[in-house]
Image: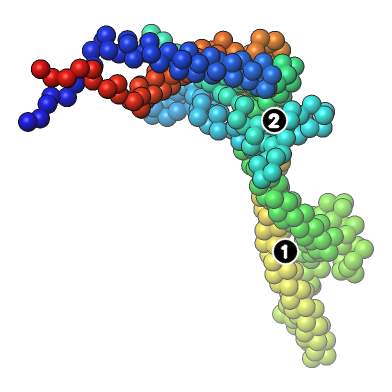
């Protein structure tokens, strides 16, 4: 027949703890002593220093219901700011600056396959301490405020590292719009070079046309041959380039009319023959003049078309080149005015000489608690392993 299992009462538990009090006292004392030795003689002291950075909202234009409305927007989210702050590029700048100064702690130096920057990242912390948006003004976007905390074995090193870190982050945040503007400027420079090349080529063709074209001379000669009154300049051009007399065509036509009139008179055969020969000579001269006039008209028409095309091309390329150079000037002004546009340091870091680790009191308390817990467990294990006492007396 089975006997019911014995259950421990509170009195039994207390009796066990009394019998095994050596474990309960020894382990907490041992763990506490180890914690004190570690805290005072082994553990490296750690100090913390904090700097604060603010990223202000920027004004942006939004198209709302056919209207352009200016609104506020955060240029970067806190998650983006944190990722930027903890990036190897930002932390690497701080690490390199401390290394050059000879102030790099041992805990941040390269060790084996672990790089110093990776070890330094363990002692960096970014927290969001931004103010909350008030419901009364939902359109107002609060700035992003973040704290940058650095833990180091020296308070001055912690403060310097925090200041270097927040300065690097501030510079990189402010470079966000600059990078966009500089990329636009680089692309614009390529367009400007192409536009300038086209403009210079159009200018060269225009100057070549002006230096080689005979348009003005042709116009002056045409007017001269047709008997159009000339300005002094045009007259000088024709006199220097042609041997024709002013209004040569009109003179020939006048002579032809006179010959026709004379032929209608009662003249003898010899005089008629002379007038006929004179008429043929005049007609040949007039045909040469007419041919020259037609040639001049064609040359003038072609030259005027070419001049108009070259002038239009020159004006178009000049306007395009000037517009791009003005845009470049505007971008350069934007770059110069955006140097300190977004991020600013609200509070720099200062050395704090109060240790954040090791916290000897907390470490000692945790060690004693752990020792007490293990001592109780050891007490029950020892009680279970204790030999059972033989039963006294026999049964009646």
Q: Quadrant of residue 391?
A: top left
Q: Looking at the image, which is closer to me, 224 or 112?
A: 112
Residue marked by disc 2: 107
Q: Residue at x 77, y 54 (%)?
A: 200
Q: Are marks 2 and 1 in contact (CB under 8 Å)?
A: no
Q: Quadrant of the image for the C terminus?
A: top left
Residue marked by disc 1: 303
* Residue 358 visible, this angle: no
Q: Residue at x 51, y 12 (%)?
A: 365
In the image: residue 131, left or right of residue 244: left
Colouring convention used in this rendered image of the protein: rainbow
Q: Earlier in the sequence, mark 2 or mark 1?
A: 2
Q: Residue at x 83, y 90 (%)?
A: 270
Q: Secondary structure at mark 1?
A: helix
In the image: residue 133, left or right of residue 10: right
Q: What residue occupies the far left of the structure in this picture? A: 1
Q: Quadrant of residue 123?
A: top right
Q: Point out residue 325 in the picture as x, y percentages from the top left corner.
A: 71, 41
In the image: residue 130, left or right of residue 378: right
Q: What residue occupies the far bottom of the structure in this picture? A: 269
Q: Point out residue 394 in the picture as x, y percentages from the top left corner.
A: 17, 19
**89 over 372 or under it: above or below:** below
Q: Residue at x 70, y 10 (%)?
A: 353
Res 208 label: none
Q: Point out residue 195 in the picture as x, y percentages from the top left corner.
A: 70, 51
Q: Point out residue 132 in the picture as x, y percentages from the top left corner.
A: 44, 13
């Amino acid at each position: 027949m089975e006997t019911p299992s014995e259950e421990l009462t509170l009195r039994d538990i207390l009796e066990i703890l009394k019998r095994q009090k050596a474990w309960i006292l020894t382990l907490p004392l041992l763990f506490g002593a180890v914690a004190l030795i570690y805290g005072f003689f082994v553990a490296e002291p750690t100090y913390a220093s904090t700097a604060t950075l603010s990223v202000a909202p920027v004004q942006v234009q939004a198209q709302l219901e056919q209207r352009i409305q200016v609104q506020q927007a955060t240029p970067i989210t806190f998650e983006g700011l944190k990722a930027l702050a903890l990036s190897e590029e930002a932390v690497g700048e701080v690490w390199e600056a401390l290394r050059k100064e000879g102030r790099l702690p041992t805990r941040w130096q390269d060790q084996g396959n672990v790089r110093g920057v990776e070890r330094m990242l363990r002692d960096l912390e970014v927290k969001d301490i931004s103010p909350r948006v008030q419901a009364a003004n939902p359109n107002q976007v609060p700035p992003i405020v973040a704290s940058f905390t650095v833990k180091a074995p020296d308070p001055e090193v912690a403060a310097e590292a925090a200041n270097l870190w927040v300065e690097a982050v501030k510079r990189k945040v402010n470079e966000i719009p600059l990078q966009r503007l500089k990329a636009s400027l680089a692309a614009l420079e390529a367009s400007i070079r192409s536009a300038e090349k086209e403009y210079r080529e159009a200018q060269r063709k225009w100057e070549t046309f002006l230096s080689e074209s005979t348009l003005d001379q042709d116009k002056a000669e045409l007017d001269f041959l047709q008997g159009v009154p000339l300005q002094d300049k045009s007259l000088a051009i024709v006199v220097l380039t042609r041997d024709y007399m002013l209004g040569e065509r009109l003179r020939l036509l006048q002579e032809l009319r006179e010959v026709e009139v004379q032929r209608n008179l009662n003249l003898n055969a010899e005089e008629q023959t002379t007038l006929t020969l004179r008429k043929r000579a005049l007609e040949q001269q007039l045909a040469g003049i007419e041919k020259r006039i037609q040639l001049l008209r064609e040359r003038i028409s072609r030259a005027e078309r070419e001049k108009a095309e070259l002038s239009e091309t020159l004006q178009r390329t000049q306007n395009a080149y000037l517009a791009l150079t003005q845009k470049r000037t505007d971008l350069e002004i934007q770059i110069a005015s955006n140097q300190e546009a977004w991020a600013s340091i609200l509070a720099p870091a200062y050395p704090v000489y109060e240790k954040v680790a090791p916290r000897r009191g907390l470490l000692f308390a945790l060690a004693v608690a752990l020792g007490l817990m293990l001592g109780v467990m050891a007490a029950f294990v020892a009680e279970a392993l204790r030999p059972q006492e033989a039963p006294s007396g026999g049964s009646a």
